[in-house]
Image (cartoon, rainbow, N blue to C red):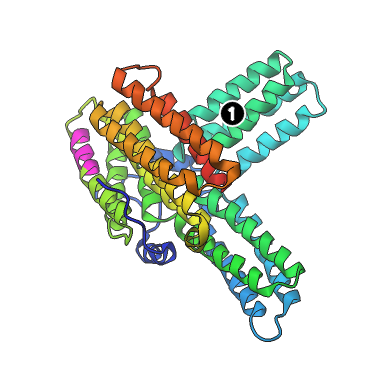
Amino acid sequence: MNKKTLTSPLAAALLIALGTATPAFAVDSGTGAQSATETHAPAAADASRVPGLAVKVLRDIADARGALHGDAPDLIRAKTLLDQAEHTLDDVQQMLPTTLIKDRIWVAKKHLEYEDTEAVLPDLVPIYASLDELVGVMPTEAAKTYLDRAQQALEKGDKPVATEQLQAVDAALLYVEADLPLSSTRHLIAQAKTDIAKQDAKAADQALADAEDNVVFVSIGIESPLTQAKESLWRAWKDRELGRVDYAKAELSRAVAYLEQAAQSTDKVTREAAAGLVSEVRELHGMLEANDTSISRQLEQTWQTAKALSERSAEYISTSWQRLRAGREDKKELIEAKLHLADARIDHVYTADDDAAKAELAEAKGYLDTALPLADQAHKAEVQALLTQVGALDQAVSTGDAKASSAKAFQEAEGVLADLIHQL
């Protein structure tokens, strides 16, 4: 499938999603089943308040923009409103499922600055507990691996390695659909306040116009069809592994409903991919009925595809459509390259379709080739390094080098690309 088609303006697409999103964690009407993993989702009630608070931020930003317009912009009022918006963003941040554990990681790292390593070991206990609570929300395997390494480093008295591994735990817990637009919104509000201090109302207004798109996404992103489909597929996979077949069926039914909504998107890539996933998930439901033992791997594959699509939406909005059009064409190309790289990994690792994997790698390379001359000088070397990594993956797939084309090798390249996208 050719994914070169550009999305239509995301603010419009997101507002359409707002009208079609349905409440999360609904009980399946057919079975009455509720996923056991749902009962462990941290701060579910708090998460339901995020859209309302995000709209409050949006109102403050819109009000601040109003104060910046006219013959006599009211800079003092605009700054006051932006201060209010920042305080509300703090409240939103506290409601994310990863915030508690990130705070605990911060405490452990702070203790490492002045305590001996033995005294810091107890700080890991609540971090492990928080990771267990997150299992119904997002993958935690990588974070647990880094935390195990941090524990080993502490036991050896190695502070630098322990600090590095704790930082890796934090990085592994990126909740893309909320963390990226929240981070971008904070940056843009800070930029607007800097412009206000310089009495440049026009520049401040432009920064806030960009911020509004990010806040629209925060207001619906956690409950958007793609995000909900991804999370339902995750819970179905975990419920199936626990032998809770009825719960898994209920989650798959929810995933189908969410994906059918996503298939109405104005974005061609999302629309076509979501429609394909609807068929896949219905097949998974049949595999559950037939007690097909290969379903666990199929569930993981389908979840990986939904995850890549959901992250693509978040990455686009974290830039804001206006700034993409105004001069961040390199980021647009990188976002599409990341999606193709994820698709290549899925084709190679899960379906063993190396021809399809090579085609996706060629697409990823094409986007990176386009991004290279568009990138600023500070990032050209990183894009070039990514091109080298993609070339190495293509060679490894062609020659059957299992180690060089492992899921880990693909994910390392995806991680580098994600980091670069998030920097821009």
Q: Please tell me in which quadrant of the rendered image residue 101 appears.
A: top right
Q: What amino acid does circle 1 point to?
A: Tyr
Tell me where residue 70 appears, x and y as whole percent: 65, 85
Residue to which mark 1 is pinned: 128
Q: What secondary structure predominates along the stretch shown in magenta?
A: helix
- Asked if the magenta segment contains residue 284, the reply would be yes
Residue occupying the point 37% across, 33% down: 238
- Is residue 264 found left or right of 137 in the rendered image? left
- Check disc 1 and report its element: helix, strand or loop: helix
| Depicted 401 relative to depicted 260: above or below | above
Tell me where residue 185 appears, x and y as whole percent: 59, 58
- Asked if the magenta segment contains residue 406, the reply would be no
Q: Nearer the viewer, residue 46 or 139?
A: 139
Regarding residue 300, the answer to whether it shows in the image is no
Q: Quadrant of the N terminus?
A: top left
Residue occupying the point 72% across, 69% down: 196
Magenta-drawn segment: 280-288
Q: Please tell me in which quadrant of the rendered image residue 249 appears.
A: top left
Tell me where residue 54 appears, x and y as whole percent: 55, 62
Question: From this viewpoint, which residue is outermost toward the top?
Answer: 156
